[in-house]
Amino acid sequence: MTDAPSAAAATAPAQRPYSPGLEGIVAATTALGFVDGAAGRLLYRGYRIGDLVEHGTYSAVANLLWTGDWDPAHRLPTTAVPAAVLATLRALPRTAKPMDALRTAVSVWGATQVLAWPPTPEQARALTAFSPSALAAFARLRQGLEPIEPDPSLDLVPGFLYQLTGEAPDASTARALDAYFIVGAEHSLNASTFTARVITSTRSDMASAVTGAIGALKGPLHGGAPSEVVEQIHEVSSPEDAERWVRDTLARGDRLMGFGHRVYRAYDPRAAALRKVAESMDHKPDWLQLAIAVEDVALRVLAEKHPERALKTNVEYYAAPVLMGVGLTPDLFPATFAVARHAGWTAHIIEQAADNRIIRPDAIYTGPTERDLPA
Ligand code: ACO
């Protein structure tokens, strides 16, 4: 590895195109996730997200992302939380954000492991199986409850719910959260995944890369907002009230949460998959039918107000009833999303390492010209 400029970088940065936020810049190749915003398609290694939700589990999807092999019977039970991590989680204030607790847990976990270069699917498995246990442990500790040991007979998602509640979930509940984990597993080169790849490109280890990725996902511009969807739906009193509420909300200049997307111009395929799951849940929230009525009106009114821009339902809209329906509290939503995204992050980490070049863009210098220190 050398610091010599490549042919592309031989000209001064000020002479090259500058793209704030790297928007439109191609910065990697990937065989993992394909996001087709125009057609509303999301593929993991070529497989449609709707088919993966229907026929797979999160464990099988994670294995697909890591290895390229589709084995629908693949299992990945959660694993025990090392003592050093548990001691750290116990030391955190109960008021700590679950996202901060998870980020800290992954960092401490990394200090308990030997994570050799290059990162491997085995490392990805170990980290992905650890994080649900760590999040569940913190969720209990902050309520004054003791953490629950993993049950190796349960696969990752039902195991996570068991460690949260102390009861193995029914099949419909486990299935619904599994679907959420599958749609959350991977979404190409978003900010947190890019963060993970940047950290990996220095030959740092997988725990460091995922710790950084969680930090990036924590920001409100990235992490999504299913809890805000829940709050908004509760402002609507009945299906008949939906039209008034949608129009009043837009007239105030507020946004309808769960609609619009930076990349998708068509109906988000993850929303379509989660809507089916939400409707088939045994314990769906009582406001699901109201949400469906609000969606119909919102799509119609958004099309009327923004004929120039397709504003469709995004994944957060139907993540909200699924996450509420499985019994998670809204303050656990962002960290649960982070746990689900482990599969994609770690797959990108492995992919980055396999064809590595340190990620080191340039900046246009806008400071003072060369000058002498004041005497
Ligand atoms: N409700 C009302 N109007 C909207 C919405 C919305 N949800 N989304 C976009 N618009 C309007 C904007 O007001 C803007 O109109 P204007 O040009 O008259 O000002 C126009 O559409 C374009 O908006 P942008 O912000 O430029 O669109 P962008 O594609 O950058 O935004 C975003 C995408 C941030 C997701 C936006 O649609 C939004 O704020 N949605 C609501 C929040 C939400 O659902 N977040 C979750 C996203 S999914 C995820 O993160 C996994």
Image (cartoon, rainbow, N blue to C red):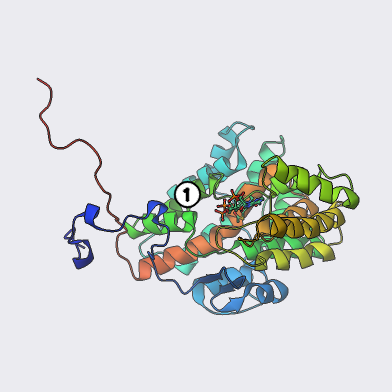
Which one is in front, 15 or 119?
Answer: 15
- Reading the image, the residue beneath label 1 is 211
- Does residue 185 sit above or below 326 in this rendering? below
Residue 179 vs 195, above or below: the answer is below
What is the three-letter code of the residue carrying label 1?
Thr
- Residue found farthest to the top: 375
User: Residue 59 location in percent, x, y?
Assistant: 62, 68
Q: Residue at x 32, y 58 (%)?
A: 359
Question: On the picture, is 213 further left or further right than 133?
Answer: left
Q: Position of residue 98 (x, y in %)?
A: 61, 42
Label 1 sits on a secondary structure element that is: helix
At a point 53% along the width and 72% down the height, the residue shown is 34
In this rendering, does residue 151 appear at all?
A: no
Q: Is residue 34 left or right of residue 257?
A: left
Quadrant where the N terminus sits is: bottom left
Q: Position of residue 222 (x, y in %)?
A: 55, 50
Q: Residue at x 42, y 69 (%)?
A: 351
In the rendered structure, the answer to whether residue 350 lies left or right of residue 173 reads: left
Residue 272 is left or right of residue 4, and the answer is right
Which quadrant holds residue 330? Answer: top right
Mark 1: few, some, or many residues within 10 Å (few <14, many ≥20)? many
Image: 208 above or below 117: above
Residue 147, horizontal then vertical, whole percent? 68, 44
Res 172 visible: yes
Task: Report the front residue among 92 and 113.
Answer: 92
Residue drawn at x 10%, y 29% is: 372
